[in-house]
Amino acid sequence: MVAFLSMTAAWIAFIMTGIFTPRYCRVLASRYTFYAVPFVGSVYLKLAQSAISSYCEKIQAGETVCRPAPASLEENPWSDFMSIVPAALFLALLLQGLMQYLMSLFNPTKRNIAVSYTVVPCIGVHLFTMVYYTMEMAEPCVLLSHYGLETRPIHCFMWICSISAQTITLYGLEIEVLAERDPLQGSASAKRISELCIGLLSVQVMCWGGVITDVVHGWPVVQGAALLAAMCALYLTLPLAALRPLERCKQKYSKIDHLVVRFSALKSFVVFSWHLFPFVWFLGYLGLVNSMQVRLGLLICDVIAKFLPVSLYISSMTD
Protein backbone atom coordinates (compact mmCIF):
# COMPACT_ATOMS: atom_id res chain seq x y z
CA MET A 1 0.00 0.00 0.00
CA VAL A 2 2.77 2.46 0.98
CA ALA A 3 4.72 1.83 -2.24
CA PHE A 4 1.63 2.33 -4.41
CA LEU A 5 0.56 5.55 -2.67
CA SER A 6 4.14 6.86 -2.72
CA MET A 7 4.45 6.24 -6.47
CA THR A 8 1.07 7.91 -7.05
CA ALA A 9 2.04 10.93 -4.93
CA ALA A 10 5.42 11.25 -6.66
CA TRP A 11 3.82 11.15 -10.12
CA ILE A 12 1.16 13.70 -9.19
CA ALA A 13 3.83 15.99 -7.68
CA PHE A 14 5.88 15.71 -10.88
CA ILE A 15 3.03 16.57 -13.24
CA MET A 16 1.87 19.41 -10.99
CA THR A 17 5.40 20.77 -11.22
CA GLY A 18 5.06 20.55 -15.00
CA ILE A 19 1.84 22.57 -14.87
CA PHE A 20 3.35 25.52 -13.02
CA THR A 21 7.04 25.29 -13.99
CA PRO A 22 7.18 23.37 -17.30
CA ARG A 23 10.89 23.94 -17.77
CA TYR A 24 11.59 21.39 -15.03
CA CYS A 25 9.58 18.73 -16.85
CA ARG A 26 11.08 18.88 -20.33
CA VAL A 27 12.10 15.29 -19.77
CA LEU A 28 8.55 14.46 -20.91
CA ALA A 29 9.64 15.35 -24.44
CA SER A 30 12.60 12.96 -24.28
CA ARG A 31 12.55 9.82 -26.37
CA TYR A 32 13.70 7.87 -23.32
CA THR A 33 10.54 8.89 -21.46
CA PHE A 34 8.44 7.31 -24.20
CA TYR A 35 10.50 4.13 -23.99
CA ALA A 36 9.93 4.00 -20.21
CA VAL A 37 6.11 4.18 -20.42
CA PRO A 38 5.40 0.40 -20.60
CA PHE A 39 7.82 -0.37 -17.76
CA VAL A 40 6.66 2.37 -15.40
CA GLY A 41 2.98 1.63 -16.07
CA SER A 42 3.45 -2.09 -15.45
CA VAL A 43 5.16 -1.40 -12.11
CA TYR A 44 2.34 0.97 -11.13
CA LEU A 45 -0.32 -1.59 -12.06
CA LYS A 46 1.41 -4.33 -10.07
CA LEU A 47 1.72 -2.05 -7.03
CA ALA A 48 -1.98 -1.15 -7.40
CA GLN A 49 -2.93 -4.83 -7.42
CA SER A 50 -0.87 -5.51 -4.28
CA ALA A 51 -2.31 -2.46 -2.52
CA ILE A 52 -5.90 -3.36 -3.36
CA SER A 53 -5.37 -6.97 -2.28
CA SER A 54 -4.08 -5.89 1.11
CA TYR A 55 -6.88 -3.34 1.44
CA CYS A 56 -9.45 -6.02 0.64
CA GLU A 57 -8.39 -7.87 3.78
CA LYS A 58 -9.39 -4.82 5.82
CA ILE A 59 -12.64 -4.58 3.87
CA GLN A 60 -13.47 -8.21 4.66
CA ALA A 61 -12.87 -7.43 8.32
CA GLY A 62 -15.30 -4.50 8.16
CA GLU A 63 -12.64 -1.91 8.96
CA THR A 64 -13.36 0.48 6.06
CA VAL A 65 -16.20 2.38 4.36
CA CYS A 66 -16.05 -0.13 1.47
CA ARG A 67 -17.95 -3.39 1.25
CA PRO A 68 -17.09 -6.71 -0.45
CA ALA A 69 -19.40 -7.99 -3.14
CA PRO A 70 -21.60 -10.88 -1.98
CA ALA A 71 -20.54 -14.27 -3.30
CA SER A 72 -23.81 -14.56 -5.24
CA LEU A 73 -22.78 -11.54 -7.34
CA GLU A 74 -19.32 -12.91 -8.13
CA GLU A 75 -20.26 -16.44 -9.27
CA ASN A 76 -21.01 -16.63 -12.96
CA PRO A 77 -20.08 -19.30 -15.53
CA TRP A 78 -19.06 -16.57 -17.99
CA SER A 79 -16.71 -14.85 -15.55
CA ASP A 80 -13.52 -16.68 -16.59
CA PHE A 81 -14.45 -16.41 -20.27
CA MET A 82 -14.71 -12.62 -19.91
CA SER A 83 -11.15 -12.50 -18.61
CA ILE A 84 -9.46 -15.10 -20.80
CA VAL A 85 -10.72 -13.82 -24.17
CA PRO A 86 -9.70 -10.14 -23.74
CA ALA A 87 -6.38 -11.21 -22.18
CA ALA A 88 -5.66 -13.35 -25.25
CA LEU A 89 -6.81 -10.59 -27.61
CA PHE A 90 -4.60 -7.92 -26.07
CA LEU A 91 -1.70 -10.35 -25.87
CA ALA A 92 -2.04 -10.83 -29.63
CA LEU A 93 -2.13 -7.05 -30.14
CA LEU A 94 0.91 -6.66 -27.90
CA LEU A 95 2.86 -9.26 -29.87
CA GLN A 96 1.78 -7.62 -33.13
CA GLY A 97 3.11 -4.27 -31.92
CA LEU A 98 6.38 -5.81 -30.78
CA MET A 99 6.83 -7.59 -34.12
CA GLN A 100 6.08 -4.36 -36.00
CA TYR A 101 8.70 -2.59 -33.95
CA LEU A 102 11.35 -5.31 -34.30
CA MET A 103 10.79 -5.78 -38.03
CA SER A 104 11.13 -2.05 -38.61
CA LEU A 105 14.63 -2.18 -37.14
CA PHE A 106 15.74 -4.06 -40.25
CA ASN A 107 13.54 -2.32 -42.82
CA PRO A 108 14.79 1.15 -43.86
CA THR A 109 11.65 1.77 -45.94
CA LYS A 110 9.41 2.05 -42.87
CA ARG A 111 10.15 5.72 -42.21
CA ASN A 112 11.80 5.33 -38.81
CA ILE A 113 8.99 3.37 -37.18
CA ALA A 114 11.62 1.94 -34.86
CA VAL A 115 12.42 5.36 -33.43
CA SER A 116 8.91 6.75 -33.61
CA TYR A 117 7.63 8.43 -30.46
CA THR A 118 4.26 6.74 -30.93
CA VAL A 119 5.15 3.06 -31.11
CA VAL A 120 6.38 2.23 -27.61
CA PRO A 121 3.54 3.94 -25.64
CA CYS A 122 1.08 2.23 -28.01
CA ILE A 123 2.62 -1.09 -27.05
CA GLY A 124 2.16 -0.03 -23.43
CA VAL A 125 -1.59 0.48 -23.92
CA HIS A 126 -2.01 -3.13 -25.03
CA LEU A 127 0.39 -4.38 -22.33
CA PHE A 128 -1.51 -2.71 -19.48
CA THR A 129 -4.87 -3.99 -20.70
CA MET A 130 -3.55 -7.52 -21.18
CA VAL A 131 -2.01 -7.47 -17.68
CA TYR A 132 -5.29 -6.28 -16.17
CA TYR A 133 -7.40 -9.04 -17.70
CA THR A 134 -4.74 -11.56 -16.67
CA MET A 135 -5.10 -10.25 -13.11
CA GLU A 136 -8.86 -10.79 -13.37
CA MET A 137 -8.25 -14.50 -13.92
CA ALA A 138 -6.70 -14.66 -10.46
CA GLU A 139 -8.77 -13.67 -7.43
CA PRO A 140 -9.47 -9.97 -7.93
CA CYS A 141 -10.81 -7.69 -5.25
CA VAL A 142 -14.48 -7.39 -6.17
CA LEU A 143 -16.35 -4.76 -4.15
CA LEU A 144 -19.98 -3.76 -3.83
CA SER A 145 -20.76 -0.31 -5.20
CA HIS A 146 -23.13 1.93 -3.26
CA TYR A 147 -25.75 1.43 -6.02
CA GLY A 148 -25.72 -2.36 -5.59
CA LEU A 149 -23.49 -3.64 -8.42
CA GLU A 150 -20.06 -5.21 -8.20
CA THR A 151 -17.04 -3.09 -9.07
CA ARG A 152 -13.33 -3.80 -9.59
CA PRO A 153 -11.11 -0.87 -8.47
CA ILE A 154 -8.07 -2.25 -10.28
CA HIS A 155 -9.89 -1.55 -13.56
CA CYS A 156 -9.70 2.19 -12.86
CA PHE A 157 -5.97 1.97 -12.15
CA MET A 158 -5.47 0.13 -15.43
CA TRP A 159 -7.27 3.03 -17.12
CA ILE A 160 -4.89 5.47 -15.42
CA CYS A 161 -2.01 3.64 -17.10
CA SER A 162 -3.62 3.15 -20.52
CA ILE A 163 -5.16 6.63 -20.84
CA SER A 164 -1.90 8.24 -19.69
CA ALA A 165 -0.05 6.15 -22.28
CA GLN A 166 -2.47 7.26 -25.01
CA THR A 167 -2.03 10.87 -23.86
CA ILE A 168 1.74 10.55 -24.14
CA THR A 169 1.32 8.78 -27.49
CA LEU A 170 -0.65 11.70 -28.92
CA TYR A 171 1.91 14.15 -27.56
CA GLY A 172 4.63 12.14 -29.31
CA LEU A 173 2.60 12.08 -32.52
CA GLU A 174 2.36 15.85 -32.37
CA ILE A 175 6.11 16.15 -31.78
CA GLU A 176 6.83 14.10 -34.88
CA VAL A 177 4.35 15.95 -37.07
CA LEU A 178 5.65 19.36 -36.05
CA ALA A 179 9.27 18.28 -36.43
CA GLU A 180 8.58 16.94 -39.93
CA ARG A 181 6.59 19.92 -41.17
CA ASP A 182 8.48 22.67 -39.37
CA PRO A 183 11.65 21.68 -37.47
CA LEU A 184 11.84 25.09 -35.80
CA GLN A 185 8.38 24.73 -34.22
CA GLY A 186 8.89 22.06 -31.61
CA SER A 187 6.18 20.66 -29.42
CA ALA A 188 8.35 20.80 -26.29
CA SER A 189 7.32 24.39 -25.62
CA ALA A 190 6.47 25.37 -22.05
CA LYS A 191 2.81 25.86 -22.96
CA ARG A 192 2.51 22.43 -24.58
CA ILE A 193 4.25 20.66 -21.68
CA SER A 194 1.91 22.43 -19.28
CA GLU A 195 -1.11 21.27 -21.31
CA LEU A 196 0.22 17.72 -21.31
CA CYS A 197 0.67 17.77 -17.52
CA ILE A 198 -2.83 19.17 -17.00
CA GLY A 199 -4.15 16.33 -19.15
CA LEU A 200 -2.19 13.73 -17.16
CA LEU A 201 -3.39 15.19 -13.86
CA SER A 202 -6.97 15.13 -15.15
CA VAL A 203 -6.57 11.41 -15.90
CA GLN A 204 -5.69 10.87 -12.25
CA VAL A 205 -8.68 12.91 -11.04
CA MET A 206 -11.05 11.16 -13.46
CA CYS A 207 -10.06 7.62 -12.48
CA TRP A 208 -9.64 8.21 -8.75
CA GLY A 209 -12.99 9.99 -8.79
CA GLY A 210 -14.51 6.92 -10.40
CA VAL A 211 -13.06 4.64 -7.72
CA ILE A 212 -14.29 6.81 -4.85
CA THR A 213 -17.74 7.21 -6.41
CA ASP A 214 -18.16 3.46 -6.64
CA VAL A 215 -16.62 2.03 -3.49
CA VAL A 216 -17.41 4.55 -0.72
CA HIS A 217 -20.56 3.79 1.27
CA GLY A 218 -22.45 6.12 3.58
CA TRP A 219 -20.87 9.38 2.43
CA PRO A 220 -23.22 10.85 -0.23
CA VAL A 221 -21.44 14.22 -0.29
CA VAL A 222 -18.10 12.53 -0.97
CA GLN A 223 -19.70 10.33 -3.64
CA GLY A 224 -21.29 13.33 -5.35
CA ALA A 225 -18.11 15.41 -5.24
CA ALA A 226 -16.06 12.50 -6.62
CA LEU A 227 -18.54 11.94 -9.47
CA LEU A 228 -18.56 15.64 -10.33
CA ALA A 229 -14.75 15.77 -10.27
CA ALA A 230 -14.52 12.69 -12.51
CA MET A 231 -16.93 14.11 -15.10
CA CYS A 232 -15.22 17.52 -15.12
CA ALA A 233 -11.84 15.81 -15.50
CA LEU A 234 -13.15 13.83 -18.48
CA TYR A 235 -14.09 17.00 -20.32
CA LEU A 236 -10.73 18.55 -19.48
CA THR A 237 -8.71 15.49 -20.46
CA LEU A 238 -10.51 14.96 -23.77
CA PRO A 239 -9.65 18.32 -25.41
CA LEU A 240 -6.22 18.77 -23.85
CA ALA A 241 -4.92 15.22 -24.16
CA ALA A 242 -6.58 14.08 -27.38
CA LEU A 243 -8.43 16.61 -29.51
CA ARG A 244 -5.92 19.47 -29.48
CA PRO A 245 -2.92 17.32 -30.48
CA LEU A 246 -4.91 15.73 -33.29
CA GLU A 247 -6.20 19.12 -34.46
CA ARG A 248 -2.66 20.54 -34.56
CA CYS A 249 -1.52 17.52 -36.57
CA LYS A 250 -4.42 17.99 -38.98
CA GLN A 251 -3.56 21.66 -39.44
CA LYS A 252 0.05 20.83 -40.22
CA TYR A 253 -1.09 18.40 -42.92
CA SER A 254 -3.82 20.72 -44.20
CA LYS A 255 -2.65 20.36 -47.81
CA ILE A 256 -2.65 16.56 -47.78
CA ASP A 257 -6.28 15.57 -48.12
CA HIS A 258 -6.13 11.94 -47.02
CA LEU A 259 -4.25 12.86 -43.81
CA VAL A 260 -6.75 15.63 -43.04
CA VAL A 261 -9.52 13.05 -43.35
CA ARG A 262 -7.60 10.59 -41.20
CA PHE A 263 -6.98 13.02 -38.36
CA SER A 264 -10.59 14.22 -38.50
CA ALA A 265 -11.77 10.61 -38.28
CA LEU A 266 -9.41 10.00 -35.37
CA LYS A 267 -10.87 12.96 -33.48
CA SER A 268 -14.41 11.73 -34.01
CA PHE A 269 -13.50 8.20 -33.02
CA VAL A 270 -11.75 9.32 -29.82
CA VAL A 271 -14.78 11.40 -28.79
CA PHE A 272 -17.10 8.46 -29.48
CA SER A 273 -15.00 5.79 -27.75
CA TRP A 274 -14.21 7.87 -24.66
CA HIS A 275 -17.91 8.51 -24.06
CA LEU A 276 -18.75 4.81 -24.17
CA PHE A 277 -17.24 4.22 -20.72
CA PRO A 278 -19.36 6.74 -18.75
CA PHE A 279 -22.40 5.66 -20.80
CA VAL A 280 -22.02 2.05 -19.66
CA TRP A 281 -21.33 3.17 -16.08
CA PHE A 282 -24.47 5.31 -15.97
CA LEU A 283 -26.56 2.40 -17.25
CA GLY A 284 -25.41 0.45 -14.21
CA TYR A 285 -25.80 3.41 -11.87
CA LEU A 286 -29.42 3.87 -12.97
CA GLY A 287 -30.15 0.18 -12.49
CA LEU A 288 -30.85 -0.50 -16.17
CA VAL A 289 -28.27 -3.32 -16.40
CA ASN A 290 -26.81 -5.85 -13.96
CA SER A 291 -23.21 -6.37 -12.82
CA MET A 292 -22.31 -8.86 -15.54
CA GLN A 293 -23.75 -6.63 -18.26
CA VAL A 294 -21.73 -3.67 -16.97
CA ARG A 295 -18.60 -5.81 -16.95
CA LEU A 296 -19.28 -6.99 -20.49
CA GLY A 297 -19.98 -3.42 -21.60
CA LEU A 298 -16.70 -2.14 -20.15
CA LEU A 299 -14.86 -5.03 -21.82
CA ILE A 300 -16.34 -4.02 -25.18
CA CYS A 301 -15.40 -0.41 -24.49
CA ASP A 302 -11.80 -1.46 -23.79
CA VAL A 303 -11.63 -3.33 -27.08
CA ILE A 304 -13.18 -0.51 -29.11
CA ALA A 305 -11.11 2.25 -27.51
CA LYS A 306 -7.77 0.41 -27.73
CA PHE A 307 -8.01 -1.98 -30.65
CA LEU A 308 -8.18 0.62 -33.43
CA PRO A 309 -6.85 4.04 -32.34
CA VAL A 310 -3.31 3.02 -31.44
CA SER A 311 -2.85 1.40 -34.85
CA LEU A 312 -4.17 4.55 -36.50
CA TYR A 313 -1.75 6.71 -34.53
CA ILE A 314 1.13 4.69 -35.92
CA SER A 315 -0.21 4.54 -39.48
CA SER A 316 -0.66 8.33 -39.46
CA MET A 317 3.10 8.63 -39.21
CA THR A 318 4.19 5.66 -41.30
CA ASP A 319 2.10 5.83 -44.47
Image: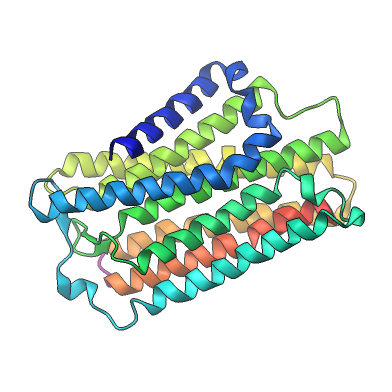
Please provide percent x and percent y for residue 10: 42, 28
Name the quarter where the N terminus is drawn.
top left
Instruction: Specify how the rendered protein is coloured.
Output: rainbow
Identify which residue is drawn at 72% across, 63% down. 99
Where does the magenta region start and end? 286-290
- Which quadrant, please, contains the C terminus? bottom right
Give the vertical position of 285 relative to 50 (above or below).
below
Per the picture, the main secondary structure of the magenta-coloured stretch is loop
Q: Quadrant of residue 283?
A: bottom left
Residue at the far left: name it.
62
- Please provide percent x and percent y for residue 134: 43, 65
In the image, residue 206 sits, relative to residue 8, either above or below, namely below
Q: Nearer the viewer, residue 86 or 241?
A: 86
The structure residue drawn at horizontal position 84% and vertical position 44%, both measured from the top left corner, is 253
In magenta segment, residue 202 = no
Q: Is residue 244 visible?
A: no
Q: Residue at x 64, y 40 (%)?
A: 34
Residue 264: % across, % down:
72, 53
Is 24 situated left or right of 203 in this image? right
Q: Nearer the viewer, residue 66 or 108?
A: 108
Residue at x-position 33% and y-position 67%: 138
